[in-house]
Image (cartoon, rainbow, N blue to C red):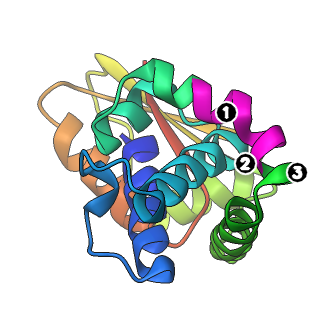
Amino acid sequence: MIAEDNFKTLCNLTTSLMGLRKGSLAFKSRKSELQVPRAVASVVARMVDDTHPTIIAKEIKRDRVSVWHYEKMHQSNYRTFPKYRETFNKIYNAYTSLHNSKRTFNDMFHLRQHLREQGIQHSANPQTTIRIVSGKVSVDIKVSYKDFYNQLELCKLALRDCNYNLEIL
C-alpha cells in the first residue's frame, strides 16, 4: 500500500527529472532514454525503500526477473556506463533528499500523541490491527472491520508528511 505509493512517487520524480512523459517508464520501448531511467528507478526503490520486486514490476509493466536483473547489473553499470551513473546519481540524490525531508518519529509517545490528535483511536470491538512503523518505533491501532477503512484513511492523512510504513495484521 505505502510501498506502491512511494514507488509511484519515485517514478514520477524520475520522469520529471529526465524530461520524460509521466508514465513512460511503463512503455514497452527498449530505447536507452527509457531503459536507463527505468532500471535506475527500480534500483533506487530497492536500495532506499526495500520495495518488493513484484510492486516494482507491476508499476513498470515488466516481470520480477527484470527487476532482479537491474539490481544485479547495478554495480557493473555504475562503474562502466557514464549515462547510467549520471542518471543514478541524479535520481538517487533527489529521492533521498525528498525522503529525508519527511518527519520520522523517535519515540512511541510522540507517535501515539500525533495519531490521537488526528482522531485515530482504537475501536471498541477490535477485529484487526493496523501497524504504523516510523523509524524504529511502531504503534498498533486495533480496529473493527466496520471502522477499518476510515481509520486507515485517517492514518494516511495524518502521516502524509512523515516517513512511515503501514502493515495490516
Q: Residue furthest right?
A: 79
Residue 123, quarter of the rendered image: top left
Q: Type of residue at label 2?
A: Met
Q: Position of residue 163 (x, y in %)?
A: 61, 59
Residue appearing at x 45%, y 51% in the figure: 7
Q: CA distance from mark 1 to mark 3?
A: 14 Å
Which residue bears the numbered disc 3? 79
In terms of secondary structure, what is the magenta stretch mainly? helix
Which residue bears the numbered disc 2? 108
Residue 118 appears in view: no
User: What mark, if any, has residue 81 been given in the picture?
Assistant: none
Few, some or many residues within 10 Å of mark 2 (<14, 14–19, 20+) = some
Residue appearing at x 84%, y 51% in the figure: 80
**Which comes sooner in the sequence, label 2 or label 3?**
3
Q: Nearer the viewer, residue 112 or 87?
A: 87
- For the residues labelled 1 and 3, say whether their Cβ atoms are less than 8 Å apart: no
Which mark's residue is nearer the viewer, 1 or 3? 3
Q: Position of residue 21 (x, y in %)?
A: 27, 75
Q: Nearer the viewer, residue 155 or 146?
A: 155
Q: Quadrant of the C terminus?
A: top left
Q: Residue furthest left?
A: 146
Q: CA distance from mark 2 to mark 3?
A: 42 Å
Q: Secondary structure at mark 2?
A: helix
Q: Nearer the viewer, residue 67 or 10?
A: 67
Which mark's residue is nearer the viewer, 2 or 3? 3
Q: Quadrant of the N terminus?
A: top left
Residue 114, quarter of the rendered image: bottom right
Q: Type of residue at label 1?
A: Glu
Residue appearing at x 59%, y 47% in the figure: 45
**Which comes sooner in the sequence, label 1 or label 3?**
1
